[in-house]
Image: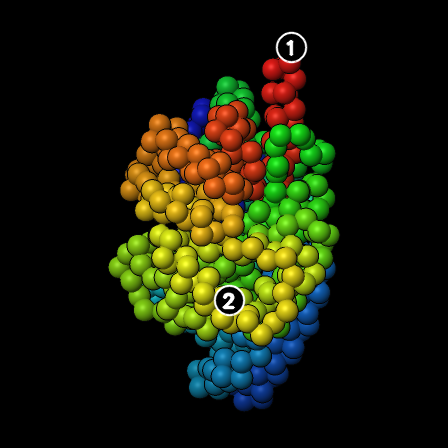
């Protein structure tokens, strides 16, 4: 489907970073090495080409040192580890030896040898079944491009197709074939409004960076790079995975009123009476945004993303360092740490878990924690130690019933029995229908709870939230959902427990009056949505007094 100028056209892809934005396109061309120089080398030329490879590896490694320093300072140390992993690949002696052997055995020049060896690695990774490992192919592609840039003495900054009028992404939506980590961080991130790409999933490093930067992004729209031109107007909905080309005025107005605040993050708004708005974070560095927007606490710290960014299991000390920095930054306001929620749409190859035909209903969340108690024990000890610095709430994911929660809490308490702890509470997530049906019993055992609307809608209506064929069924506008939410709110009132709400529904201002009417007045959202919710609550209070 080729969009016509000024005719609204819709595409559905994969949502990889939430939020909505409207802006013009900056079309990026990453094919600067599509016509590779290749020639035969003889005699002394072989040693010369091998020296060029070794020098290129050293220079590329030095470039990555600068990127690591920059990302660590601007975004956070967890995100910087993405580029540390690329540097580790460059330092692999087997990889370098294969390139040098290709020069010797096939009489290739340096560029051809680099391309041949790294193309082979990238192709093998792209063919594996595991999504996480497939996404790592982009790292190999980045290293290939970086080495070829050095060999050709090309400035690594990317250019769009129309150099004369190129905006370099400033106040634009970047459309590219693939969202790479370097593209994500080497542009002016304060001026980029969104990303649209043909390739790249939720677990890609670039997607992790886009979420950390709060930039809406949609991937998986085949051929979009070739269908658009620089200057085309787009509406990008990073929550629904929708891209609208040449959106009509009424479409833009509806997006602003019904779903998300468009374009830039608004100024901080002070807390308002009757509504508690907390922040969702995925990395310790995200707490800076929570503080900036005057969050009344962290309602959801998705701790598994620290492990994904590192690409390995973090030690107790490494976890403590991250958790302690968040608790200190919140300065007495509560921080809710969700224990590792791995599985389903968040595979973790570093755990060497068995492949499952239906991972959404498999070995994930609390089931995984019970099966891998070593993970739970290390995290429990880090959290107990962090609680000495400020209030810590521990939230157990994907709980199915009271008995499962009690067993998990028992493992936690056993692992931390020898540690002095501060203010520490244990709570549950309501996201599985069976847990919702015994909400009162669970709340009698737990000290607090949070409703995870994204998974709850998925499981309640048996709808895959990532499947565009059934996207219309993935909606909070169904009476059954509100019946379930009302039952949980009533159980909270009966037991005297606090229940917060997170997920996309929490940040939708259209749903705010309905939530508050149920008594669900504690919300946890991405920091950029905090001002909008508070403004909506203030306007509702003003309207009710008129």
Task: Tell me which corner region of the image, top left, top right, bottom left or bottom right, holds residue 389.
Answer: bottom right
Count of marks overlaid on the render: 2
Residue 437 location (% of width, % of height): 34, 42
Tell me which numbered mark, 2 or 1, is placed earlier along the sequence.
2
Q: Is residue 373 left or right of residue 303?
A: left
The residue where tag 1 is placed is 546
Q: Residues within 10 Å of mark 2 (few under 14, many from 20)?
A: some
From what the image shows, is residue 165 above or below residue 207?
A: above
SS class of the residue under badge 2? helix
Q: How is the image coloured?
A: rainbow
Q: Residues within 10 Å of mark 1 (few under 14, many from 20)?
A: few
The residue where tag 2 is placed is 413
- Who is closer to the viewer here, 307 or 276? 276
SS class of the residue under badge 1? loop
Q: Split into 4 quadrants, where in the image is the C terminus? A: top right
**Separation of marks 2 and 1 at Cα, in angstroms:** 52 Å
From what the image shows, is residue 493 above or below residue 140?
A: above
Q: Is residue 524 left or right of residue 157?
A: left
Q: Determine the residue positioned at 61% across, 26% down.
A: 537
Residue that extends furthest to the left in the rendered view of this protein = 357
Residue 65 disc label: none
Residue 422 location (% of width, % of height): 65, 61
Q: Determine the residue positioned at 46% across, 62% down.
A: 409
Q: Determine the residue positioned at 45% across, 65% down.
A: 410
Residue 240 location (% of width, % of height): 44, 38
Residue 418 visible here: yes
Task: Tell me which corner region of the image, top left, top right, bottom left or bottom right, holds residue 60.
Answer: bottom right
Residue 11 location (% of width, % of height): 41, 36
């Amino acid at each position: 489907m080729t969009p016509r100028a000024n005719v609204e056209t819709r595409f559905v892809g994969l949502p990889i970073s939430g939020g909505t934005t409207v802006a013009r396109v900056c079309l990026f061309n990453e094919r600067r090495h599509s016509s590779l120089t290749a020639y035969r080398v003889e005699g002394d030329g072989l040693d010369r080409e091998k020296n060029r490879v070794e020098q290129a590896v050293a220079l590329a490694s030095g470039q990555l040192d600068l990127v690591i320093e920059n990302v660590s300072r601007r975004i956070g140390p967890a995100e910087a580890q993405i580029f540390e992993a690329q540097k580790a690949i460059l330092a692999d002696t087997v990889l370098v030896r294969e390139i040098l052997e290709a020069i010797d055995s096939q009489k290739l020049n340096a560029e051809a040898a680099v391309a041949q060896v790294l193309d082979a690695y990238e192709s093998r990774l792209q063919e594996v079944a595991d999504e996480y490992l497939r996404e790592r192919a982009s790292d190999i592609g980045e290293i290939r491009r970086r080495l070829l840039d050095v060999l050709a003495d090309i400035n690594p900054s990317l250019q769009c197709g129309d150099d004369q009028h190129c905006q370099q992404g400033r106040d634009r939506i970047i459309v590219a074939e693939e969202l790479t980590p370097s593209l994500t961080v080497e542009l002016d991130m304060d001026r980029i409004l969104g990303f649209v790409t043909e390739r790249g999933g939720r677990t890609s490093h670039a997607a992790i960076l886009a979420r950390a930067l709060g930039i809406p992004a949609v991937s998986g729209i085949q051929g979009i790079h070739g269908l658009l031109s620089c200057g085309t107007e787009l509406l990008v909905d990073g929550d629904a995975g929708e891209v609208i080309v040449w959106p009509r005025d009424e479409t833009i107005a509806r997006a602003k009123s019904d779903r998300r605040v468009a374009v830039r993050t608004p100024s901080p708004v002070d807390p308002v009476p009757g509504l508690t708005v907390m922040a969702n974070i995925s990395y310790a560095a995200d707490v800076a945004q929570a503080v900036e927007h005057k969050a009344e606490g962290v309602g959801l710290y998705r701790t598994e993303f620290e492990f994904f960014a590192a690409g390995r299991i973090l030690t107790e000390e490494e976890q403590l360092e991250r958790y302690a920095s968040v608790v200190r930054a919140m300065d007495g306001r509560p921080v809710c740490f969700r224990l590792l929620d791995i599985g389903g749409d968040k595979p973790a190859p570093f755990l060497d878990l068995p492949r499952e035909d239906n991972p959404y209903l498999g070995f994930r969340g609390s089931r995984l924690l019970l099966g891998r108690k070593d993970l739970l024990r290390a995290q429990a000890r880090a959290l107990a130690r962090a609680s000495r610095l400020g209030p810590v709430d521990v939230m157990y994911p994907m709980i199915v019933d009271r008995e499962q929660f009690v067993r998990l809490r028992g493992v936690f308490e056993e692992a931390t029995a020898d540690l002095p702890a501060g203010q520490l509470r244990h709570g549950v997530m309501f996201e599985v229908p069976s847990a919702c049906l015994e909400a009162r019993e669970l709340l009698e055992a737990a000290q607090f709870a949070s409703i995870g609307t994204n998974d709850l809608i998925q499981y309640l209506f048996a709808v895959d939230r990532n499947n565009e064929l059934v996207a219309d069924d993935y909606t909070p506008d169904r009476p059954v959902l509100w019946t379930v939410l009302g039952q949980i709110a009533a159980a909270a009132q009966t037991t005297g427990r606090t229940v917060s709400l997170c997920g996309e529904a929490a940040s939708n201002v259209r749903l705010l009056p309905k939530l508050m009417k149920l008594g669900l007045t504690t919300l946890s959202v991405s920091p950029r949505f905090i001002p909008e919710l508070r403004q909506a609550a203030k306007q509702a209070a003003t309207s009710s007094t008129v």
